[in-house]
Amino acid sequence: MTDDIQLLIGTRKGAWTLRSDAARKTWSVEGPLFLGQIINHFVVDPRDGRTMLMAASTGHLGPTILRSTDGGKTWAEARQPPAFSKDDPHGRTVHHTFWLEPGHADEPGVWWAGVSPQALFRSADQGDTWEGVAGLNEHPKVLDWFPPMDGGTPDGPMVAGIVIDPRGARHMYLATPTAGVLETTDQGATWAPLNENVRCDYLPDPYPEYGQDAHQIALAPTNPDRLWQQNHCGIYRLDRPARRWDRIGDNMPREVGDIGFSIVPHPRCAETAWVFPMDGTEVWPRVSPGGKPAVYRTRDGGASWERQDKGFPREQGWFTVKRQAMCGDGRDPFGLYLGTTGGEVWMSGDEGESFRQIAAHLPEIYSVVAAPLP
């Protein structure tokens, strides 16, 4: 590995890579790769720094996984992408893969994939072949947790996030738009909802066992017992072994609200995290509130939030940031990156104190992942 850095950008019309040296001052834009194909997620394996996977939807191949084992120099389709069996009892077919997650550090070669309709797949050979996780996909309550939906979320119902406890491969969390957060302690053999005190404004019972829309979840790297959640109905925090989430988004400014897609924890401070709010009023425009984009940071576990907008448009900035399109680079000072629905990439090299645009005029951005150059 080098001190140089790359950003892997997945968009509605292909993939791009941004590269810089350790100073993070000047960026080069390379691409496109697979122009015209939907790339929901573009990820590098941190365990080897060279294996890359893309969750792609293509006109002629349909939903598939594209793989590179040489740092992106060459690519090939997975021999067996995620797919339900032909005799699936619920008649499901994979529409697209939404989320790709490298396995635990102790399991090289293992990857996980969340798909639409909602289901989980696992690969043990660096993403070349995939098998369904029966403990979830064939669960007795699978149709209750994941009811068939013709509408719902704009991109279809999908497993929207996969989080693995760094202390052990058997403990995992899923973010889903119809069952909220699900947890397993036996690597997917059994699952249970983890949604206590998470509100559902759109259901008759506002606090059901399941039914919530978890937009994104993340562990605090220095304290994996702390979970952050950006939900359809607010920002939440959970400190295990407790099961009751706290709505820390109630401490956001009322005129901004606590609705958004992404949440990014600080790599060295469990009290600090960032969100990018969007307009979640009655008609749900899914744009920056008032056309004035900003990141909000908490440094006290969500008890208070500060607006960080230096460098962003002061007005007429009508974009938002999707689930996988905001990330950090782990460096000191911590670098923040976000890709917008307007095809721009913004960065902060000073933990959100200021932002600048480092790419523009790309297609709608679905995912941004920061990683060292191999």
Image (spheres, rainbow, N blue to C red):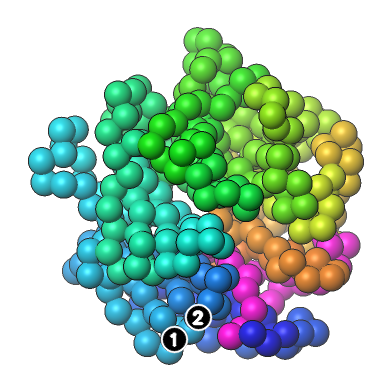
Identified by mark 2, the residue type is Arg
Pointer 1 local density, CA inside 10 Å: few below 14, some 14–19, many at least 20: few
Measured as percent of width and height from the top left, residue 88 is found at: 16, 39
Q: Identify which residue is drawn at 50% across, 41% down.
A: 174
Left or right: where 298 falls relative to 112: right
Q: Is residue 146 magenta?
A: no
Q: Identify which residue is drawn at 45% across, 74% down.
A: 52
Q: Is residue 232 above or below residue 132?
A: above
The magenta-colored residue range is: 345-374
Q: Name the residue nearer the viewer: 374 or 276.
A: 374
Can you say which quadrant of the picture contains the C terminus? Answer: bottom right
Spatial CA distance of label 2 from label 1 is 5 Å
Q: Name the residue nearer the viewer: 147 or 293.
A: 147
Mark 1 and mark 2 in contact (Cβ < 8 Å)? yes
On residue 314, which mark appears?
none
Pointer 2 local density, CA inside 10 Å: few below 14, some 14–19, many at least 20: some
On residue 50, which mark appears?
2
Q: Is residue 194 above or below residue 137?
A: above
Q: Name the residue nearer the viewer: 81 or 106.
A: 106
Q: Identify which residue is drawn at 58% across, 67% down.
A: 369
Q: Identify which residue is drawn at 29% across, 58% down.
A: 130
On residue 70, which mark appears?
1
Identified by mark 1, the residue type is Asp
Q: Which image quadrant is residue 236 in?
A: top right
Can you say which quadrant of the picture contains the N terminus? Answer: bottom right
Measured as percent of width and height from the top left, residue 204 is found at: 50, 10
Give the SS element for disc 1.
loop
Left or right: where 169 falls relative to 84: right
